[in-house]
Amino acid sequence: MVLESLVNTKIVLYLENYESLIERMIELHTFASLPSVLLIDDFDAYINDYKETEISQDLHIARICSLILDTMNSCARILKINVYICAWSFSGINDICTYTIYFINIWNVMNEEENNTIFLQKYLQKTFTEQCPSYRYCKLEDGTRDIFGK
């Protein structure tokens, strides 16, 4: 099943601006081969590409996120498989509540260069006492790679 969904994967990266992203999302359902994974690099570039005199940033974010979700939900219905959205944002963690309206699977990824480790922690919008899943990915000096979960 995993291999089958990877066959249909298309990666959309480095569209020049918000309008280009929106155009691609709108026309995506017309593609002969629909994506099962959508990767958006530097999501901040699209989030910050708006004119404050025309629209508020919250409304701008709402438009982008809802269009992305609607597009990928359409792909899921047509393909009859789960589809995934992976968007990278540097500033998103600063205003995480805005994004939790649209996305339920949000992870904070930190590169700890001093000990050659990547730390991943899932953001949960639950009680403060509930433990969030987290993982450490280490590359040891001998080239061995380890993943430690909490």
Image: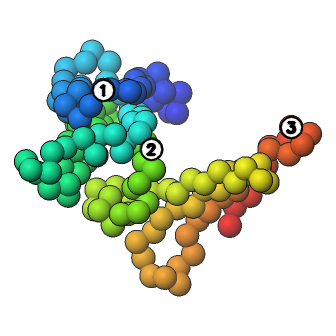
Q: Is residue 143 above or below residue 106?
A: above
Residue 29 falls left or right of residue 45? left
Instruction: Please name the amino acid that badge 3 sits on.
Output: Gly
Q: Identify residue for label 3.
A: 143
Q: CA distance from mark 1 to mark 2?
A: 16 Å
Can residue 78 be seen here? The reply is no
Q: Is residue 54 above or below residue 28?
A: below
Instruction: Please name the amino acid that badge 2 sits on.
Output: Trp
Q: Is residue 61 above or below residue 39?
A: below
Q: The C terminus is located in which quarter?
A: bottom right
Under tag 2, what secondary structure? Answer: loop
Q: Identify residue for label 1.
A: 16
Q: CA distance from mark 1 to mark 3?
A: 37 Å
Under tag 3, what secondary structure? Answer: loop
Say which mark, if any, is on residue 88. Answer: 2
**Badge 2: how crowded within 10 Å, few (<14), some, or many (20+)?**
some
**Badge 3: how crowded within 10 Å, few (<14), some, or many (20+)?**
few
Nearest to the eye among marks 3 and 2: give it. 2
- Mark toward the start of the polypeptide (1 vs 3): 1
Q: At which x and y percent is residue 17?
A: 26, 31
